Protein backbone atom coordinates (compact mmCIF):
# COMPACT_ATOMS: atom_id res chain seq x y z
CA UNK A 1 0.00 0.00 0.00
CA UNK A 2 1.24 3.46 -0.92
CA UNK A 3 0.74 6.21 1.65
CA UNK A 4 0.76 9.93 0.86
CA UNK A 5 0.22 12.73 3.37
CA UNK A 6 -1.14 16.26 3.30
CA UNK A 7 1.35 18.91 4.39
CA UNK A 8 0.32 22.57 4.75
CA UNK A 9 2.51 25.57 4.03
CA UNK A 10 2.59 26.13 7.76
CA UNK A 11 6.24 27.16 7.83
CA UNK A 12 8.39 29.38 5.58
CA UNK A 13 8.68 27.60 2.24
CA UNK A 14 12.25 26.39 2.74
CA UNK A 15 11.32 24.88 6.09
CA UNK A 16 8.20 23.28 4.62
CA UNK A 17 10.36 21.78 1.85
CA UNK A 18 12.71 20.36 4.48
CA UNK A 19 9.70 18.89 6.33
CA UNK A 20 8.58 17.26 3.07
CA UNK A 21 12.02 15.73 2.66
CA UNK A 22 11.52 14.24 6.12
CA UNK A 23 8.28 12.67 4.89
CA UNK A 24 10.24 10.82 2.21
CA UNK A 25 12.70 9.62 4.84
CA UNK A 26 9.75 8.42 6.93
CA UNK A 27 8.60 6.13 4.11
CA UNK A 28 5.74 8.09 2.55
CA UNK A 29 5.17 7.64 -1.17
CA UNK A 30 3.93 11.17 -1.83
CA UNK A 31 3.09 14.55 -0.38
CA UNK A 32 0.24 16.85 -1.35
CA UNK A 33 0.43 20.51 -0.33
CA UNK A 34 -2.64 22.74 -0.23
CA UNK A 35 -2.96 25.61 -2.69
CA UNK A 36 -4.01 28.50 -0.45
CA UNK A 37 -2.93 31.84 -1.87
CA UNK A 38 -4.18 33.55 1.29
CA UNK A 39 -1.42 31.78 3.24
CA UNK A 40 1.07 34.09 1.55
CA UNK A 41 3.12 31.05 0.51
CA UNK A 42 2.89 29.49 -2.92
CA UNK A 43 2.38 25.74 -3.27
CA UNK A 44 4.30 25.36 -6.53
CA UNK A 45 7.35 27.22 -5.23
CA UNK A 46 7.21 25.01 -2.15
CA UNK A 47 6.94 21.83 -4.24
CA UNK A 48 9.83 22.96 -6.47
CA UNK A 49 12.07 23.38 -3.43
CA UNK A 50 10.90 20.02 -2.09
CA UNK A 51 11.63 18.38 -5.44
CA UNK A 52 15.29 19.35 -5.14
CA UNK A 53 15.47 17.84 -1.65
CA UNK A 54 13.82 14.50 -2.52
CA UNK A 55 14.44 11.61 -4.89
CA UNK A 56 11.42 9.35 -5.23
CA UNK A 57 8.59 11.19 -3.52
CA UNK A 58 5.51 12.07 -5.60
CA UNK A 59 4.68 15.75 -5.30
CA UNK A 60 1.45 17.59 -6.04
CA UNK A 61 -0.82 20.43 -4.98
CA UNK A 62 -3.70 19.15 -2.86
CA UNK A 63 -5.55 20.82 -4.27
CA UNK A 64 -5.50 23.55 -6.95
CA UNK A 65 -8.60 24.92 -8.65
CA UNK A 66 -9.48 26.64 -11.95
CA UNK A 67 -11.00 29.68 -10.21
CA UNK A 68 -7.93 31.18 -8.53
CA UNK A 69 -5.60 29.82 -11.24
CA UNK A 70 -6.40 29.91 -14.95
CA UNK A 71 -6.19 26.48 -16.68
CA UNK A 72 -3.33 27.72 -18.88
CA UNK A 73 -1.41 28.81 -15.78
CA UNK A 74 -2.06 25.47 -14.06
CA UNK A 75 -0.80 23.55 -17.09
CA UNK A 76 2.35 25.67 -17.27
CA UNK A 77 3.03 25.27 -13.54
CA UNK A 78 2.51 21.52 -13.73
CA UNK A 79 4.95 21.15 -16.61
CA UNK A 80 7.52 23.39 -14.93
CA UNK A 81 7.43 21.17 -11.86
CA UNK A 82 7.65 18.12 -14.13
CA UNK A 83 10.93 19.42 -15.51
CA UNK A 84 12.34 19.55 -11.98
CA UNK A 85 10.96 16.17 -10.84
CA UNK A 86 10.26 14.05 -13.93
CA UNK A 87 7.51 11.43 -13.47
CA UNK A 88 7.09 12.41 -9.80
CA UNK A 89 4.39 15.03 -10.34
CA UNK A 90 0.62 15.00 -10.63
CA UNK A 91 -1.67 17.98 -10.91
CA UNK A 92 -4.80 17.76 -8.78
CA UNK A 93 -7.76 20.02 -9.46
CA UNK A 94 -11.03 20.54 -7.57
CA UNK A 95 -13.84 23.11 -7.52
CA UNK A 96 -12.16 25.03 -4.70
CA UNK A 97 -13.06 25.74 -1.11
CA UNK A 98 -11.00 27.96 1.21
CA UNK A 99 -8.85 29.44 -1.57
CA UNK A 100 -11.93 30.32 -3.61
CA UNK A 101 -13.88 31.61 -0.63
CA UNK A 102 -11.03 33.92 0.32
CA UNK A 103 -11.47 35.88 -2.91
CA UNK A 104 -15.25 35.94 -2.64
CA UNK A 105 -15.88 33.61 -5.58
CA UNK A 106 -18.13 30.54 -5.83
CA UNK A 107 -16.70 27.09 -6.40
CA UNK A 108 -16.30 25.89 -9.97
CA UNK A 109 -19.37 24.15 -11.33
CA UNK A 110 -19.40 20.65 -12.78
CA UNK A 111 -19.46 22.17 -16.28
CA UNK A 112 -16.52 24.46 -15.49
CA UNK A 113 -14.56 21.57 -14.03
CA UNK A 114 -15.21 19.45 -17.14
CA UNK A 115 -13.94 22.23 -19.42
CA UNK A 116 -10.94 22.97 -17.25
CA UNK A 117 -9.72 19.40 -16.81
CA UNK A 118 -10.11 18.58 -20.50
CA UNK A 119 -8.35 21.81 -21.44
CA UNK A 120 -5.43 21.25 -19.06
CA UNK A 121 -4.95 17.69 -20.30
CA UNK A 122 -4.93 18.89 -23.91
CA UNK A 123 -2.39 21.59 -23.12
CA UNK A 124 -0.11 19.13 -21.33
CA UNK A 125 -0.24 16.88 -24.43
CA UNK A 126 0.96 19.79 -26.55
CA UNK A 127 -2.37 20.33 -28.28
CA UNK A 128 -3.85 23.70 -29.23
CA UNK A 129 -6.80 25.09 -27.30
CA UNK A 130 -8.86 28.24 -27.60
CA UNK A 131 -9.44 30.89 -24.95
CA UNK A 132 -11.79 33.76 -25.74
CA UNK A 133 -11.30 33.32 -29.47
CA UNK A 134 -7.51 33.05 -29.25
CA UNK A 135 -5.81 29.77 -30.14
CA UNK A 136 -2.82 28.89 -28.01
CA UNK A 137 -0.72 26.00 -26.71
CA UNK A 138 2.21 25.24 -24.40
CA UNK A 139 5.52 25.59 -26.22
CA UNK A 140 7.14 22.97 -23.97
CA UNK A 141 5.57 19.74 -22.75
CA UNK A 142 6.71 16.43 -21.31
CA UNK A 143 6.39 12.88 -22.61
CA UNK A 144 4.46 11.37 -20.97
CA UNK A 145 2.43 14.41 -19.96
CA UNK A 146 1.87 15.22 -16.30
CA UNK A 147 -1.26 13.34 -15.16
CA UNK A 148 -4.26 15.42 -14.14
CA UNK A 149 -6.25 14.14 -11.17
CA UNK A 150 -9.52 15.44 -9.80
CA UNK A 151 -10.09 15.71 -6.08
CA UNK A 152 -13.71 14.65 -5.75
CA UNK A 153 -16.08 14.49 -2.79
CA UNK A 154 -19.59 14.74 -4.19
CA UNK A 155 -21.10 11.97 -6.33
CA UNK A 156 -21.33 14.18 -9.44
CA UNK A 157 -17.67 15.16 -9.14
CA UNK A 158 -16.71 11.50 -8.70
CA UNK A 159 -18.55 10.68 -11.93
CA UNK A 160 -16.83 13.58 -13.66
CA UNK A 161 -13.43 12.32 -12.55
CA UNK A 162 -14.19 8.99 -14.20
CA UNK A 163 -15.26 10.84 -17.33
CA UNK A 164 -12.38 13.29 -17.88
CA UNK A 165 -9.41 12.86 -15.50
CA UNK A 166 -6.33 10.63 -15.39
CA UNK A 167 -7.05 9.71 -11.80
CA UNK A 168 -8.86 10.79 -8.68
CA UNK A 169 -8.39 11.62 -5.03
CA UNK A 170 -11.69 10.47 -3.54
CA UNK A 171 -13.08 11.64 -0.21
CA UNK A 172 -15.60 8.84 0.36
CA UNK A 173 -14.31 7.08 3.47
CA UNK A 174 -12.98 3.54 3.82
CA UNK A 175 -16.19 1.55 4.33
CA UNK A 176 -16.44 -1.09 1.58
CA UNK A 177 -20.01 -0.13 0.66
CA UNK A 178 -19.05 3.53 0.21
CA UNK A 179 -15.90 2.59 -1.71
CA UNK A 180 -17.86 0.31 -4.05
CA UNK A 181 -20.49 3.02 -4.56
CA UNK A 182 -17.77 5.50 -5.50
CA UNK A 183 -16.19 3.06 -7.93
CA UNK A 184 -19.59 2.59 -9.58
CA UNK A 185 -19.81 6.36 -9.99
CA UNK A 186 -16.38 6.39 -11.64
CA UNK A 187 -17.58 3.72 -14.06
CA UNK A 188 -20.71 5.75 -14.87
CA UNK A 189 -18.50 8.70 -15.78
CA UNK A 190 -16.14 6.57 -17.83
CA UNK A 191 -19.07 5.10 -19.75
CA UNK A 192 -20.23 8.61 -20.59
CA UNK A 193 -16.97 9.29 -22.43
CA UNK A 194 -16.63 5.76 -23.78
CA UNK A 195 -13.33 4.98 -22.13
CA UNK A 196 -11.82 2.31 -19.92
CA UNK A 197 -10.59 2.87 -16.38
CA UNK A 198 -7.85 0.24 -16.70
CA UNK A 199 -5.10 2.87 -16.33
CA UNK A 200 -7.11 5.14 -14.02
CA UNK A 201 -5.46 5.67 -10.64
CA UNK A 202 -7.51 6.12 -7.48
CA UNK A 203 -6.21 7.52 -4.20
CA UNK A 204 -8.47 7.52 -1.15
CA UNK A 205 -8.36 10.65 0.99
CA UNK A 206 -8.29 9.37 4.56
CA UNK A 207 -9.12 11.72 7.44
CA UNK A 208 -6.77 10.74 10.25
CA UNK A 209 -6.36 11.37 13.95
CA UNK A 210 -3.53 9.35 15.49
CA UNK A 211 -3.40 9.50 19.28
CA UNK A 212 -2.00 7.33 22.03
CA UNK A 213 -5.32 8.07 23.72
CA UNK A 214 -7.43 6.03 21.30
CA UNK A 215 -10.87 7.04 22.67
CA UNK A 216 -9.97 10.73 22.35
CA UNK A 217 -9.41 10.28 18.62
CA UNK A 218 -13.01 9.06 18.22
CA UNK A 219 -14.41 12.47 19.16
CA UNK A 220 -13.81 13.85 15.68
CA UNK A 221 -17.47 13.53 14.52
CA UNK A 222 -18.57 15.47 17.60
CA UNK A 223 -16.48 18.52 16.70
CA UNK A 224 -16.90 21.66 14.61
CA UNK A 225 -14.55 22.62 11.77
CA UNK A 226 -15.52 26.24 12.32
CA UNK A 227 -18.44 27.82 14.22
CA UNK A 228 -20.86 27.49 11.29
CA UNK A 229 -19.71 24.11 9.94
CA UNK A 230 -19.51 20.68 11.60
CA UNK A 231 -16.35 18.75 10.82
CA UNK A 232 -18.46 16.06 9.18
CA UNK A 233 -19.56 18.67 6.63
CA UNK A 234 -16.01 19.73 5.76
CA UNK A 235 -15.34 20.42 2.94
CA UNK A 236 -18.97 19.78 1.97
CA UNK A 237 -22.16 17.99 2.89
CA UNK A 238 -21.09 15.17 0.53
CA UNK A 239 -19.52 13.37 3.49
CA UNK A 240 -23.04 12.59 4.68
CA UNK A 241 -23.84 11.01 1.29
CA UNK A 242 -21.01 8.49 1.60
CA UNK A 243 -21.81 7.78 5.24
CA UNK A 244 -25.34 6.88 4.11
CA UNK A 245 -23.83 4.52 1.56
CA UNK A 246 -22.05 2.96 4.54
CA UNK A 247 -25.36 2.57 6.38
CA UNK A 248 -24.96 5.60 8.66
CA UNK A 249 -27.79 8.09 8.19
CA UNK A 250 -27.26 11.45 9.89
CA UNK A 251 -29.88 14.19 9.66
CA UNK A 252 -28.80 17.20 7.60
CA UNK A 253 -29.20 19.44 10.64
CA UNK A 254 -27.36 17.19 13.10
CA UNK A 255 -25.57 18.79 16.04
CA UNK A 256 -22.05 17.34 16.40
CA UNK A 257 -21.89 17.30 20.19
CA UNK A 258 -25.18 15.40 20.32
CA UNK A 259 -23.78 12.41 18.43
CA UNK A 260 -23.52 9.51 20.93
CA UNK A 261 -20.06 8.09 21.55
CA UNK A 262 -20.99 4.70 20.05
CA UNK A 263 -22.23 6.37 16.86
CA UNK A 264 -19.12 8.53 16.71
CA UNK A 265 -16.96 5.39 16.87
CA UNK A 266 -18.95 3.83 14.02
CA UNK A 267 -18.54 6.97 11.93
CA UNK A 268 -14.80 7.04 12.56
CA UNK A 269 -14.43 3.43 11.47
CA UNK A 270 -16.33 4.14 8.25
CA UNK A 271 -14.64 7.42 7.44
CA UNK A 272 -10.93 7.13 8.16
CA UNK A 273 -8.19 6.36 10.66
CA UNK A 274 -8.84 7.23 14.29
CA UNK A 275 -7.02 5.77 17.25
CA UNK A 276 -3.60 4.63 18.34
CA UNK A 277 -0.95 3.97 15.68
CA UNK A 278 -1.58 0.25 16.06
CA UNK A 279 -5.35 0.72 15.63
CA UNK A 280 -4.79 2.85 12.53
CA UNK A 281 -2.53 0.16 11.08
CA UNK A 282 -5.19 -2.47 11.67
CA UNK A 283 -7.83 -0.28 9.99
CA UNK A 284 -5.63 0.23 6.92
CA UNK A 285 -4.98 -3.50 6.71
CA UNK A 286 -8.72 -4.06 6.76
CA UNK A 287 -9.25 -1.46 4.03
CA UNK A 288 -6.78 -3.31 1.86
CA UNK A 289 -8.44 -6.68 2.42
CA UNK A 290 -12.08 -5.52 2.30
CA UNK A 291 -11.90 -3.09 -0.60
CA UNK A 292 -8.58 -3.59 -2.34
CA UNK A 293 -7.47 -0.06 -1.41
CA UNK A 294 -3.80 0.26 -2.30
CA UNK A 295 -3.16 4.00 -2.10
CA UNK A 296 -4.28 6.45 0.59
CA UNK A 297 -3.78 10.16 1.17
CA UNK A 298 -3.54 10.85 4.89
CA UNK A 299 -5.46 14.00 5.73
CA UNK A 300 -4.79 14.95 9.38
CA UNK A 301 -7.97 16.24 10.97
CA UNK A 302 -7.93 19.86 12.08
CA UNK A 303 -10.15 22.82 12.71
CA UNK A 304 -9.99 25.83 10.42
CA UNK A 305 -7.80 27.55 13.02
CA UNK A 306 -5.38 24.60 13.05
CA UNK A 307 -5.22 24.10 9.31
CA UNK A 308 -1.58 25.15 9.07
CA UNK A 309 -0.21 23.01 11.89
CA UNK A 310 2.52 20.71 10.59
CA UNK A 311 1.64 16.99 10.92
CA UNK A 312 4.75 16.04 12.88
CA UNK A 313 2.92 13.58 15.16
CA UNK A 314 1.32 11.81 12.19
CA UNK A 315 4.64 11.55 10.37
CA UNK A 316 6.24 10.00 13.46
CA UNK A 317 3.41 7.48 13.91
CA UNK A 318 3.56 6.38 10.29
CA UNK A 319 7.36 6.25 10.31
CA UNK A 320 7.63 4.21 13.47
CA UNK A 321 4.56 1.95 13.40
CA UNK A 322 2.16 2.15 10.49
CA UNK A 323 4.35 2.12 7.38
CA UNK A 324 6.64 -0.65 8.71
CA UNK A 325 3.49 -2.66 9.48
CA UNK A 326 2.07 -2.07 5.99
CA UNK A 327 5.31 -3.21 4.44
CA UNK A 328 4.50 -6.74 5.66
CA UNK A 329 1.22 -6.85 3.70
CA UNK A 330 1.20 -9.38 0.84
Image (tube, rainbow, N blue to C red):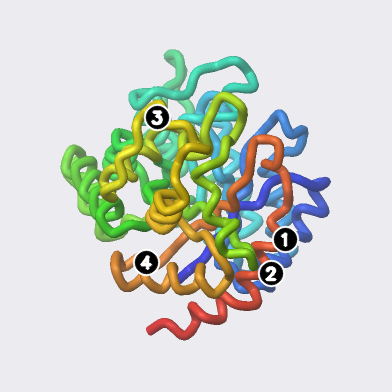
Question: For residue 113, which numbered disc appears in the image?
Answer: 3
Query: Which residue corresponds to the image point at 28% horizontal and 59% vertical from the top-left?
Result: 176
First in sequence, mark 3 or 4: give its number: 3
Counting residues from the start of the chain, the first of labels 3 and 1 encountered is: 3
Marks 1,4: beta carbons within 8 A = no
Measure the C-alpha gap from mark 4 to mark 2. 21 Å
Q: Check disc 1 and report its element: helix, strand or loop.
A: helix
Of the numbered discs 1 and 4, the one sitting upstream in the chain is 4
Q: Is residue 316 visible?
A: yes
Q: Does the CB distance between marks 3 and 4 fall below 8 Å?
A: no
In the rendered view, tell whether residue 322 sits above or below residue 83: below
Would you call the spot at circle 4 few (<14 residues within 10 Å), some (14-19), or many (20 or more)? many
Say if 43 sits above or below 98 in the image: below
Measuring from the top left, give residue 228's x and y in whole percent. Answer: 56, 24
Q: Nearer the viewer, residue 327 or 48?
A: 327
Measure the alpha-carbon separation of dots 3 and 2. 36 Å
Residue occupied by mark 1: 312
> For this view, does 91 lie left or right of residue 109?
right
Q: Which residue is mark 2?
A: 316
The answer to whether the residue labelled 4 contacts the one labelled 2, judged by CB atoms less than 8 Å apart, is no
The tag earlier along the polypeptide, 3 or 2, is 3
Q: Are marks 2 and 1 in contact (CB under 8 Å)?
A: yes
Give the mark nearer the N terminus: 4 vs 2. Answer: 4
Q: Residue at x 70, y 62 (%)?
A: 313
Residue that carries the numbered disc 4 in the rendered image: 287
Quadrant into which the N terminus falls: bottom left
Q: Quadrant of residue 160?
A: top left
Q: Are marks 3 and 1 in contact (CB under 8 Å)?
A: no
Q: Which residue shows up at 75% across the image and 38% down it?
A: 41
Say which element carries label 3: helix
Q: Nearer the viewer, residue 313 or 279?
A: 279
Q: Hey, which quadrant is residue 192 in on the image?
A: top left
Amino acid sequence: MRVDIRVPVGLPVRETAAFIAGCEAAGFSGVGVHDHQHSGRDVFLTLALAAERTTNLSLYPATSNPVTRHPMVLASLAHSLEEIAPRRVRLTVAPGYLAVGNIGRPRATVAAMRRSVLTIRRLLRGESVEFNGVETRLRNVSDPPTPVFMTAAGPRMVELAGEVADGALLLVGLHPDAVNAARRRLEIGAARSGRSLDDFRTIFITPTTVSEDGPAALRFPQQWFRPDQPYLKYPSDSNLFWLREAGIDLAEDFVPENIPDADAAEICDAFGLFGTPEECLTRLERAASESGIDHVFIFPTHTQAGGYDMPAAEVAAFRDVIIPGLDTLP
